């Protein structure tokens, strides 16, 4: 299949002697390179090719190398984009993980503060219970001593009541005897 460029190149008539020399060898032509192209670097890249007069096979090889480089460049570009996307995804994951850990740390801090507050409240309640227990123990001791003194007083009062009842019986006995004596005297 012929392209337009090939057909135009075939229809061009050589004007100089150099072009006529190149026309005798259809597989090669002479090429004048501009000064900004580094010929030494090209020779290193393509050691088997004459840079100033490349053959048709050399140009096809250069095209193949160029296409391979473009394909490699495209593949590298895709890999680079994939690596960037992966790195960005990892950054997002790391940011998310960091935010999760920070929020978890805040939750732990809040939980710790609540536990410390509860602990302080429990300590205060314990101190109040200890004070209440001491007050109740003092009341129990007071009631116990009051009970023992009341018990002693009760015993004393019982003895007095018993003594009084005995005296009363004795008096009743004396009064009855006196009445009997008086009724007998009369």
Image (spheres, rainbow, N blue to C red):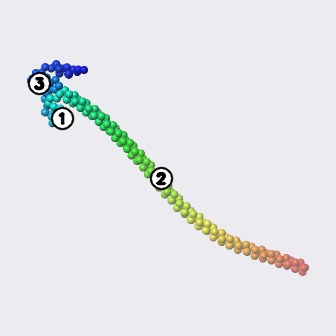
Quarter residue 2 falls in? top left
Please say if 163 is above or below 30. Answer: below
- Report x, y in % for residue 23: 13, 23
- Among the two numbered marks 3 and 2 on one chain, the one whose residue lies closer to the N terminus: 3
The residue singled out by tag 2 in the image is 114
Q: Quadrant of the C terminus?
A: bottom right
Q: Quadrant of the N terminus?
A: top left
* Tag 3 near tag 2, CB within 8 Å: no
Left or right of 24? Residue 84 is right
Q: Can residue 19 be seen in the rendering of this structure?
A: no
Q: Earlier in the sequence, mark 2 or mark 1?
A: 1
Q: Nearer the viewer, mark 3 or mark 2?
A: 3
Q: Secondary structure at mark 1?
A: loop
| Residue 5, quarter of picture | top left
Q: Is residue 67 above or below residue 11?
A: below
Q: Which is nearer the eye, 77 or 175?
A: 77
- Badge 3 local density, few (<14 within 10 Å), some, or many (20+)? some
Residue 43 in view here: yes
- Provide the residue designation for mark 3: 21
Residue in the image at 87% along x and 80% along y: 181
- Identify the residue at the far left of this view: 17
Q: Is residue 30 above or below residue 83?
A: above
Q: Is residue 24 above or below residue 104?
A: above
The residue to which callout 1 is attached is 47
> Label 3 to label 1, Cα distance in Å?
24 Å
Q: Residue 16, image x and y in percent?
A: 9, 23
Earlier in the chain: of badge 3 and badge 1, it is 3
Q: Is disc 2 surrounded by few (<14), some (14 to 19) or many (20+) residues within 10 Å?
A: few
């Amino acid at each position: 299949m012929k392209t337009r460029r090939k057909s135009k190149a075939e229809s061009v008539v050589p004007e100089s002697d150099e072009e006529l020399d190149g026309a005798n060898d259809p597989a090669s032509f002479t090429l004048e390179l501009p000064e900004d192209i580094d010929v030494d670097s090209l020779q290193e890249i393509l050691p088997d090719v004459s840079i100033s007069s490349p053959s048709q096979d050399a140009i096809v090889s250069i095209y193949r190398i160029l296409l391979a480089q473009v394909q490699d460049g495209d593949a590298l570009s895709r890999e680079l984009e994939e690596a960037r996307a992966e790195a960005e995804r990892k950054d997002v994951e790391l940011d998310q993980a960091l935010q999760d850990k920070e929020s978890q740390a805040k939750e732990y801090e809040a939980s710790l503060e609540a536990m410390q507050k509860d602990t302080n409240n429990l300590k205060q309640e314990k101190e109040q219970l200890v004070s209440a227990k001491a007050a109740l123990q003092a009341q129990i001791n007071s009631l116990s001593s009051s009970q023992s003194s009341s018990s002693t007083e009760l015993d004393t009062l019982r003895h007095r009541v018993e003594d009084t009842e005995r005296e009363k019986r004795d008096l009743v006995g004396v009064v009855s005897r006196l009445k009997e004596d008086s009724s007998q005297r009369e």
